[in-house]
Image (spheres, rainbow, N blue to C red):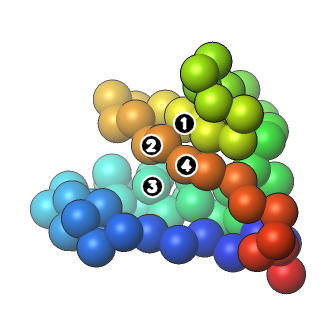
Amino acid sequence: MFEIKVSNKSKKFVQKQDAPTRKRIKNALLQLAEDPYYRKENDIKKMKEYNDIFKLRVSDIRMIYKVELKFRS
């Protein structure tokens, strides 16, 4: 299991979304906590410019995240 840290700005953004969108984002984050490199929906892409930064598409929302193996629990 990986630890997920969400910025305050991102938290505020999620709070402004409607309930179904918030649920999709929450489910995506839970899946990332289990495996940040793969999702069944295959909507994770590695950022070409960076080694450990990825983007995840949830509906029309793009989530950018970094994998730091030292935080794995």
Which amino acid type corresponds to the residue marked 1 in the rendered image?
Answer: Leu
Q: Position of residue 1 (x, y in %)?
A: 83, 72
Q: Which of the labelled discs sits on residue 14, or is there none? A: none
What is the number of the mark on residue 63?
Answer: 2
Determine the CA span between mark 2 and mark 1. 5 Å
- Tag of residue 25: 3
Residue underneath mark 4: 65
Along the line of sight, which residue is nearer the eye, 65 or 43? 65
Q: Residue at x 73, y 60 (%)?
A: 68
Residue 39 visible within the image? no
Marks 1 & 4, CB-CB < 8 Å contact? yes
At which x and y percent is residue 9?
24, 65
Q: Which image quadrant: the C terminus?
A: bottom right
> Residue visible at 60% across and 70% down?
4
* Residue situated furthest bottom in the rendering: 73
Q: Nearer the viewer, mark 1 or mark 3?
A: 1
What kind of residue is marked 4? Tyr
* Disc 1 secondary structure class: strand
